[in-house]
Structures are given as structure tokens and as C-alpha cells.
Amino acid sequence: MTLFGFRVPMMASLLVWCVIWEIVGRSGAMFLIPPLSDVLVAAVALVQTGTWQAAALTTLNSFLLGMFFAIVVGIAIGVLMGRSATADNLLGIWVNIFVSAPLSALVPVLMILFGMGETTVVVTVFLFAVWIIVLDTRAGIQSVPNSLLEMGRSYGASRFALYSKIILLAALPEILAGIRLGVVRGVKGVVIGQLLVAIIGYGELFELYSRNFDMENFWALTIILFAAAMGLSALIENIEKRVDYYAGVR
Amino acid sequence: MRNITAQAASAASRPAGSDVAVEVRGVCKMYNEVEALRGIDLDFPSGKLTTLLGPSGCGKTTLLKIIAGLIPATSGEIRVNGKTVTGPGPERAFVFQDFALMPWATVMRNVAFGLELKGMGKDERQAIAAKYIAEVGLAGFENKYPHELSGGMRQRVGLARAFAVNADVLLLDEPFSAVDEQNRRKFQEDLLELVEKEKKTFIFVTHSIEEAVYCSDRIVILSRRPGRIAQIIEPEIDRSATPDAIRRDQGYLDTVEEIWQGLKRYVD
């Protein structure tokens, strides 16, 4: 990006907003917004507490479990839909409904079904993440060139080899894109799930701090969460780029 | 040049004294209501390069894929070395129009892929692949990826892959159509050398008359949909001459002209 002929670094706009936040916080105009520096100090202190570490561990556990099932089930259904027109017709409408539906509304129902515990949070993560993985995997499978399939068949590939050595690898760029979008949605899922269940992990801390107007800790928690979500997404994007490099000339 | 008319085709398509590698018997193909091929009877002599030539939509690629076992014929049968074809088999190898290389695999792995699928050990298959990579003129490119190669080089990889599985019959589906003109000429010359050297049966699909006449021992011309055999021509060109001399040879030019006169009526 250039501004008046000067090259502006990527993080510049972020820095500008940080400065604005600091000024607004120092002015004391809104008690909801403490100065950024105080928030950062609070964040450093926060991550050293046992409460935060326990909450983070619970949250990470629910998130990873939910994501694991979302990825496995999402890829399986996506492959099925990509390869079979019947499955595509049967499942397509449901996947499209769920991918755009406001799933937060379902969490209270999940609480009744799965109880006020971690199971509900895992299921929430799963439901948030799985649909986009299904759709992207399906798109990837459908874009595998027919000649690659014919190549596999004509050189005697077994059904298993056809999937493991050709189809899944050829669809990998789209599958990874689906997983990246799924991870972002999964982070939303874990926080919303925990907020609504309200007695475990990060959600419990959010409730605690916001109810007590402990804004430094509240914002510290938010910033840590945002950073974690962005970091995860960037990590997968990095893998994606490496894969795209090889898949560029399909 | 020897011109064999369609009427005499069944008698003449069994060349005396040479073995028949692939027999096509009464093959018809319907795509729903569209008739793509009608009553094809053909013999492909072993060790020769036979070209299927015809206007677009004449079903030449369809016939090739039926021979490959990739798509089923509606009726009729294919025999390769006397055995009826029910699907793809190790005695046939296919070279694809769009190369069909795996973009995530190196030249080496792509060429060795047919052997990998057969379960051959890594060292053994890489040794065989290396030999054919060198034979198609790609020595030194073993660890490159397809996107680092030109179109012509990519198709050489496809050809090396087909050679590596040591099939008797090589099926080439418009292998040069995605290769630029200059590379194509060089590639055609190299292909003729390989045909000479490898002693395999080649079945070649093309829409280029010059390419067909230049490369083939025998040319089968298919008519427009439904595809039927319109003409069988044996160019009988002296291959001992240099490539440039062949392209100026009167017999070569006459054959190209005659095929063009025959095909002209199919062109809109």
C-alpha cells in the first residue's frame, strides 16, 4: 500500500488504531475502554494465573476435539458428495442450509441434548466448522481433472490408491481452504458455546470479567483470543500456499 | 501410398505376414441418443504406428478410450493379443492429451507412477523410470515438478510414463495438440525414433493431417458422426530419409493433399 507516494507497512493501520485506543483510554472518556497499555499489562499478568491456564486448556481441548470430528466428518461427506451425484442431491440442500444458518440459536437446544458441559461445546465447535469443510472438499473433489482419474484407472490403480494417491491430493488445496475457514468458525463456536453454557473455560472468564466490569482483563482475554484465531488461520494459510505452489498447474 | 477403400477394408485390414496386436470387432457406441461410433471393424498391426484421423466429433478419441478400457462399448468387442478387453490392463498404456501429470509429484515420481501402482519397490522402479526419462530426452529434469516444464517437456514425461510400464500397446490421444508448433515437430521426429527403437504397437489419435502422414505406417480415416471407417491409407514413406527431406517428399505431399480432399466435405 502506498499513501502520498510513501510505502506504508502492512501493520501501520493496526498501529494507528492502537494509538487511538491508547489516547481514548487515557482521556478516561469511556470507562469501558481502559488504555491499551493497561490491557497489555493485564494480559501478561493474566496468562500467568492458574485460572487462565485451566480455562485455556479446557477451551483448547473442546476446540481440538470438535475440530477433529469436523475435519474427519467434513472431508468424508465432502468426498462422498463430490463423487456421487445421488449423495450430492440428498445432502446438498442440508449442507447449504446449515452453512448459512445462525447456529448460535441452536446452542440452547444442544444444552438440553448434551447437558451443560464440555460435550455441548464440542458439538457446537463441530457444527460451526463442519459445513464449510464439506462444501470446500466437495468443490475440490469435483475439480479433480477427469484425465487424472482416467490416468489412475488406466495404470491399474486400485480404488484405495485412486483416492489416497490421486483424488485426495488433487483436492488438497480446496480441502485446506475449507479447514482454514472451518478453524475460524470453530473458534467462534468454542467461545459462543462456552459463553452460553457459561460455566466452563473461556466463556466462564468472559462472564466473570464482564459482569464485574473488569475491563482490563476482559480486553486482555479478547486480544489473546483474536491473536490465537488469527495465528491458527495464518498457520494453515501458510501450508495452503505451499500446496498451491505444486497444484498451480492442474 | 496405398489407398485401401472402405469396401475392401475388412479384407485388407488384416495385413498378411504381420501379427495383429489389437482387433476391433463390430464396435458401436451410443451416448444416450447420440450415435458416436457405428460398426467399427479394425485390425491394428503389431509393431506399427496406426493413426485414427478424422473431423472433430468423429469419435476417434472415443474409440481410443474404448480400446483402453476406460469407457465401455455399447456393442462389439476389443481383443488385445487375442484376449477380450473388459477394462484397463497392463498390456496397454495411455498418453493423455492434457498430459495428466500429478502436479504435486516430481518428474521421477510421475514417470514411475505406473510401476508404483503395480507395487514395485522404489529403487527398482526409479531405475526403470530414469532410463525412460533419459530416452525421451529429459535427463537432468528428474527432480523438477510439472509446472517447471514446458508443454512439450510435460508430454515427454507422459510418454516416458507410458513406456516405463512396458506395455505392448501404446495409446496416444492427441499427444501433441497442447504442444507448440516448433516443439511438436521435434517431438514427432523423436517419437518416430522411439517407435523404431521400442518395437511396440502405437495407436495414435490426431486431427492434424500432416502429423498423421508424417508419423504413421497406416492411417484410418473416420467419417463424421456416427463415426465409421471412411478410408484406410498406408503412406509408405521412406523413413530412412531425414525428417526435412520427408516433409518435402512428393509422396508425402500427395498423401496429405489426398486426405485433405477426402476430409474437406466434413468441414463446415
Image: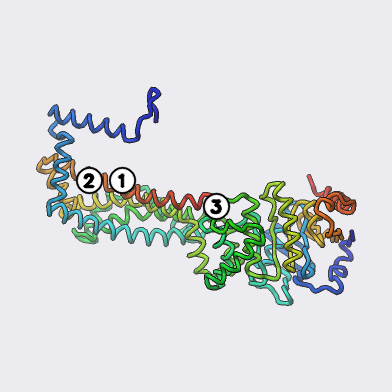
Report which residue position mark 3 lands on.
A250
Residue A190 position, x and y percent, is 25, 52
State left or right for residue A184 relative to residue B266.
left
> Element at badge 3?
loop
Mark 1 vs mark 2: which is more N-terminal? 2
> Element at badge 1?
helix
Give whichever of A168, A81 is nearer the camera.
A168
Quarter in which the N terminus of chain A is drawn: top left
State left or right for residue A122 relative to residue B164.
left
Report which residue position mark 2 lands on.
A224
Looking at the image, is B69 positioned above or below residue A144? below
Mark 2 vs mark 3: which is more N-terminal? 2
At label 1, counting other C-alpha atoms closer than 10 Å, the crowd grade (few under 14, some 14-19, many 20 or more) is: some
Identity of the residue drawn at 53% across and 73% down: B121
Report which residue position mark 1 lands on.
A230
Identity of the residue drawn at 86% across and 53% down: B252
Q: Is any atom of residue B157 visible in this view?
A: yes
Looking at the image, is B2 positioned above or below residue A32? below
At label 3, counting other C-alpha atoms closer than 10 Å, the crowd grade (few under 14, some 14-19, many 20 or more) is: some
> What chain does mark 1 sit on?
A
> What chain does mark 3 sit on?
A
> Element at badge 2?
helix
Residue A30 position, x and y percent, is 14, 30
Residue A247 position, x and y percent, is 50, 52
Q: Which amino acid does label 3 sit on?
A: Arg
Q: What residue type is labelled 2?
A: Ile
